[in-house]
Image: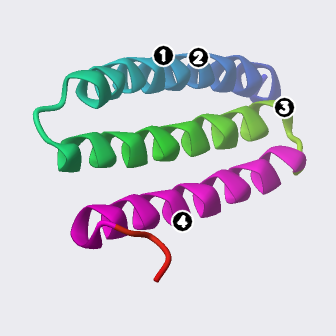
Amino acid sequence: MTSIVLPEFLSWVVHITLGCYAAAMVISLFRLFVGPSSQDRILAADFIYNIAMLVILVLGIRYSSAMYFEVALLIAIFGFVSSTAMAKFLLRGEVIE
């Protein structure tokens, strides 16, 4: 009986989690477009990358596929590199020295 209840429970948890991530992404997109300063916009973009990575991880758990985890790793790497480049551009005015 627990083998039947667990996948249904996991399905509900995945849907609730994706809904929470969607709400967080909407709030973050608002901060990205309306943010009062450039630092707020960079932080919102970095947060959007993190949420996208988490959504991909939840979908990987849902569909039991290792491919999603590799995609999440790529998103994490590109998110880190891009937020570092944007922060360096704000500090120095150039990315490549």
Amino acid type indicated by mark 4: Val
Pointer 2 local density, CA inside 10 Å: few below 14, some 14–19, many at least 20: some
83 in magenta: yes
Residue 46 drawn at (x, y percent): 40, 49
**Magenta-drawn segment:** 67-93
Q: Secondary structure at mark 3?
A: helix
| Residue bearing mark 2 | 15
Amino acid type indicated by mark 1: Gly
Q: Nearer the viewer, mark 4 or mark 3?
A: 4
Amino acid type indicated by mark 3: Tyr
Does the residue at mark 3 contact the one at mark 2 (Cβ under 8 Å)?
no
* Separation of residues labelled 2 and 4 (CA atoms): 30 Å
Choose top left, top right, bottom left or bottom right for residue 73: bottom right
Q: Secondary structure at mark 4?
A: helix
Mark 1 or mark 4: which comes first in sequence? Answer: 1
| Residue bearing mark 3 | 63
Which mark identifies residue 81? 4
* Separation of residues labelled 3 and 1 (CA atoms): 17 Å
Q: Tell me the residue at 48%/47% (across/down).
A: 50
Q: Tell me the residue at 10%/33% (across/down).
A: 36
Where's the N terminus, which quadrant?
top right
Mark 2 or mark 4: which comes first in sequence? Answer: 2
5 in magenta: no
Which mark identifies residue 19? 1
Depth order, front residue of 42/23 = 42
Q: Label the magenta part by its dominant secondary structure.
A: helix
* Separation of residues labelled 4 and 3 (CA atoms): 28 Å
